[in-house]
Amino acid sequence: MGKFQVIDHPLIQHKLTIIREKNCGTKVFREVVDEIAMLMAYEVSRDMPLEDIEIETPMGTSVQKTLTGKKVAIIPILRAGIGMVDGMLELIPAAKVGHVGLYRDHDTLEPVEYFVKLPADIADRQLFVVDPMLATGGSAIMAIDLLKRRGATNIKFVCLVAAPEGVKALQEAHPDVDIYTAGLDEKLNDEGYIVPGLGDAGDRLFGTK
Ligand code: URA
């Protein structure tokens, strides 16, 4: 079974509370999501492999650490996932970005694929699939299904708020995928929203309704 981790760093927890507040406006919401995503990138990249290289400092030759292993691609699930991309790119600026467009059918609550554009070499990359809300897990499962069909093997899922139902569904569907969240909430309501959650992440990021 993949790792499931609530990233309980005080800065992340504090910032998550700010965006949960219903009176938090679009500007602050967007900025704080950006900051949380950046801080989460620090944690989710913690196990990136290092290798020794020899360098020249002004004082002489020295063996030091440098990143090795797979290059990264960040894969936002549209539309809300876009809000987490820039923050992650601040720490992993050379990452490529692929987009997976899924919308949730309001009647069935099932995800429907409408746009997929990925780096050609996703099979060789460490993928960070990002979506602020892990609710039923339907979108995350479908996005990861389609990435695996295209050869991806190394996938981590990063969200801001998760429902227990979504975590369970994603773990069952993709036991090899590590899941990181800033908050693990109580439940889903009858409309598929996370409670207490933060509402519709896409609407709050983009100021739509
Ligand atoms: N998507 C959202 O944006 N919010 C939820 O609470 C659940 C799914």
Image: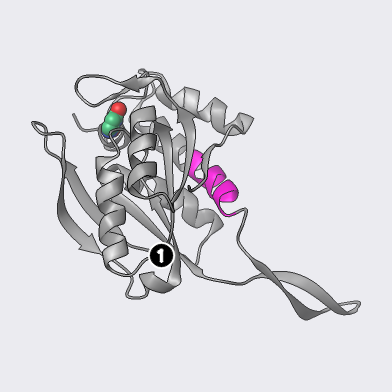
Residue reaching furthest to the right: 59
Quadrant showing the C terminus: top left
Magenta stretch in the rendered image: 36-45
Q: What residue is at 42 percent from the left and 40 percent from the top?
A: 159
- Check residue 39 for magenta coloring: yes
Does residue 205 appear to the left or right of 69 in the view shown?
A: left
Out of 172 and 184, give the one closest to the viewer.
172
Amino acid beneath label 1: Thr
Left or right: residue 58 versus residue 137 is right
Decide: is 47 above or below 57.
Answer: above
Image quadrant in which you'd find residue 80: top left
Furthest-left residue in this view = 107
- The residue where tag 1 is placed is 153
Horizontally, residue 21 falls left or right of residue 51, namely left
x%, y% of residue 92?
A: 53, 60
Residue at horizontal 27 percent and vertical 25 percent from the top? 193
Whether residue 114 is situated above or below residue 136 in the rendered picture:
below
